[in-house]
Image (cartoon, grey):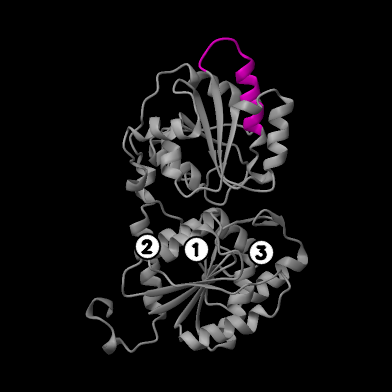
Amino acid sequence: MKVLHVVTGLAAGGAERQLHLLLRHLPDRHHCEVAALTNPGTVAEALRADGFVVHDLAMRGNRDLAVLPRLTRLIRARRYQAVHTHLYRAGLYGRIAARLAGVPAVLATEHSLHPGVIEGRAAGRGVRALYLAAERLGRTTLAVSGQVATTLHDWGVSPHRVHLLPNGIEAARYAVPSGTRETVRAALGLPPEAFVVGAVGRLVPGKRFDVLVGALAALAARPGGRPVRLLLVGEGPERPALEALAARAGVADALLPTGERDDVPELLAAMDVLAAPSAEETFGLTVLEGLAAGLPVLCTACPALDGLGPEAAPGAVRLPGTAEAYTAALAGLRDAPRRRLPQPPAVAHYDIARIAAELADLYDRFDPAPVAHRPAALRV
């Protein structure tokens, strides 16, 4: 089956990285290409390096309607049998273009949805109405967590149109050699003896990385103990504000923002603990990555772990989203001996190979080819 994945952009965000990972693990019976409405960034480069075709539609803004005929022509010319969209703008334009091009199999993955908020932005009545109108043009909406599925239902999407397909993780990718820790620390200028608190994600207000800057300042003010550093992996509009906050607190030299990176497993190896103070997450992929890397994890919200039970991730500790709570927890870890934790059951539960196989089975249901012409393995 020939599938076009339409995505708003391909910078190194969670949804974009998840798309790349899924495509790498989908069975060969499905030929996939990608179309980015705008910003074909580092993930586009990685996809092309892996042999995937990536189309840049050069959309100039949210209201650049000229992208719609370009996308429609692409779908017709390349004769895709299914269109799978990711993120809000791509969901709007991709579903419409697929219908105009006569493609009946249209899916969308909803990566980031909360009550009243979509992808970190307020979703008022108009946004919700437009979302629901576009959703009806597709056949299925995939929710990455039960929380997202519940919000879709609350918004008015019929439960029979929602399919739960969580994010996945490539566990083996995080089992990096032990020597990587010293190498990465040296490259980043981190003292070998430093206690490194790590955080991964877009630098936006919703991630609440200011909580960690506050905890960093409080820990730095405590006498004794190992020197503390805060390693922020990601980029975004909140970076200047976080740097200014660190400067006012006198810990500017202890804050290390890396910018956008594609070597997250190696950077995790340089950390002593992963912290995720965001109060609202649609899945919590970063938490799973930290657990896969053998780190203790402090988090405030992680729907991926909800319902699995404490034995699924004993290394993850839930905290209130305050600087005081994170300071206390980090202080205890700073003075404890460092050890790499084994990958917990939660990591295996979200194995990307299993998630990709489930998506492939879903594509098979939409395959327009007669059963007799399908490979024997696909006949039912």
Q: Is residue 250 above or below residue 158?
A: above
Residue placed at 31% from the left, 37% from the top?
Answer: 177
Q: Is residue 217 above or below residue 235?
A: above
Q: Position of residue 252 (x, y in %)?
A: 66, 28
Q: Earlier in the sequence, mark 1 or mark 2?
A: 2
The residue identified by callout 2 is 24
Q: Position of residue 101 (x, y in %)?
A: 55, 88
Q: Nearer the viewer, mark 1 or mark 2?
A: 1
For the image shown, how many numbered marks are present on the structure? 3
Main SS category, magenta section: helix
Do callouts 2 and 3 mark residues in contact (Cβ within 8 Å)? no
The part of the image, by quadrant, that contains residue 179 is top left
The residue identified by callout 3 is 155
The part of the image, by quadrant, that contains residue 311 is top left
The residue identified by callout 1 is 44
- Label 1 secondary element: helix
Give how far apart the Cα atoms at labels 1 and 2 are: 13 Å
Give how far apart the Cα atoms at labels 3 and 1 are: 32 Å
Q: Which residues are magenta?
A: 211-226
Q: Quadrant of the N terminus?
A: bottom left
Mark 2 crowdedness (10 Å alpha carbons): few <14, some 14-19, many ≥20: some
Q: Earlier in the sequence, mark 3 or mark 1?
A: 1
Judge whether residue 267 is colored magenta. Answer: no
Query: What numbered label is drawn on residue 87?
Result: none
Judge whether residue 218 is colored magenta. Answer: yes
**What type is the residue that disc 2 sits on?**
Arg
Q: Earlier in the sequence, mark 2 or mark 3?
A: 2
- Label 2 secondary element: helix
